[in-house]
Image (cartoon, rainbow, N blue to C red):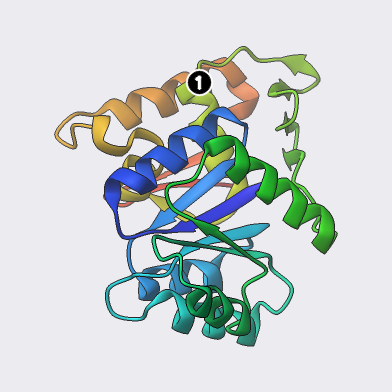
Amino acid sequence: MKILVIEDSRATSDFIKRGLDEEGFAVDTAFTGEEGLELARTFDYDLVLLDVMLPGKNGFEVCESLRQYKAHIPILMLTGKIEVEDRVHGLNSGADDYLVKPFSFGELVARIHALTRRAGQPVHTELKAGPLVMNTSSRKVTFNGENIELTNKEYALLEFLLLHPGMLVTRVMLEQTIWNQEFDGNTNLIDVYVRRLRNKMGQDGEGLIQTVRGAGYRLVLP
C-alpha cells in the first residue's frame, strides 16, 4: 500500500514514516501543502495522511484541492487541535477521518486499514517489471522465477523504483525517502546499493535499472 504523508514537522513525519515502513507500507513524505499536492498529482496513492497546520496552504485547503482531482482517495487528517469545530471543518473539507495528536501508532495503523477497506481501494501487493516480481505482503522478490535475498535498504530502494516505473527517480528523492536523516549526501552510497541490486539480478537485469547521468535512476519497463 502506498501512502503520502503531508506533515511539516520533520520529527513527526520521520516517526510516522519509520513506523509505516516497518508495517510494510511504501511511504512518500511532503513538508508543505504545495509539495504534497504536487506529489499527489504526479503519483497514485492508496491513502493520504494530512496535517492541518501546514505552512502556506493549510490542511483544510489541501484537502479541498485534493478532492477536486482525487475524489475517491481516503484522506486521514492529523491535528493537535481537539475542538469539535476543527474536526467538523476537516470533515466538511473532504476528509474521511480525523486523528488528534498525540495518537498511538497502533490506532493510526488501524484507522488506515479501516479507511482503505471502506473505500475499496486496491492494495499494491505485487509489483512487476518484466521478469522482476516483488510481493509487498510477503516481501518476497524473484527475478526470472528465482528468489533474490535483499537487505532492508536494498528492498526499500527496489520497491521505490518499482512504484515509480519509467520515471526519473532523483538521488534527492531516494535520500529523503529511504535514508532520511541518516544519509550523508557526500557519499556514493546510493550508487553502491544500485550496483548491488544489479549484481543480484545478474546479467539479465543489467539494463533494468538505468543510470541517468547527473540526475538519478530510472526503472526501465521491458
The residue drawn where x is 29% and y is 54% is 9
The residue drawn where x is 77% and y is 39% is 125
The residue that mark 1 highlights is 152
Residue 159 spot, x, y in % from top left: 58, 37
Residue 31 to residue 217: above or below: below
**Residue reaching furthest to the front:** 83
User: Which of the 4 image quadrants contains residue 56?
Assistant: bottom left
The residue drawn where x is 45% and y is 24% is 153
Pick whichever, 135 or 35, lies toward us: 35
Residue 96 to residue 128: above or below: below
Residue 220 spot, x, y in % from top left: 59, 47
Q: Secondary structure at mark 1?
A: helix
Pick whichever, 218 or 105, lies toward us: 105
Q: Amino acid at mark 1?
A: Asn
Residue 62 shows up from this direction = yes
Residue 9 to residue 62: above or below: above
Residue 212 shows up from this direction = no
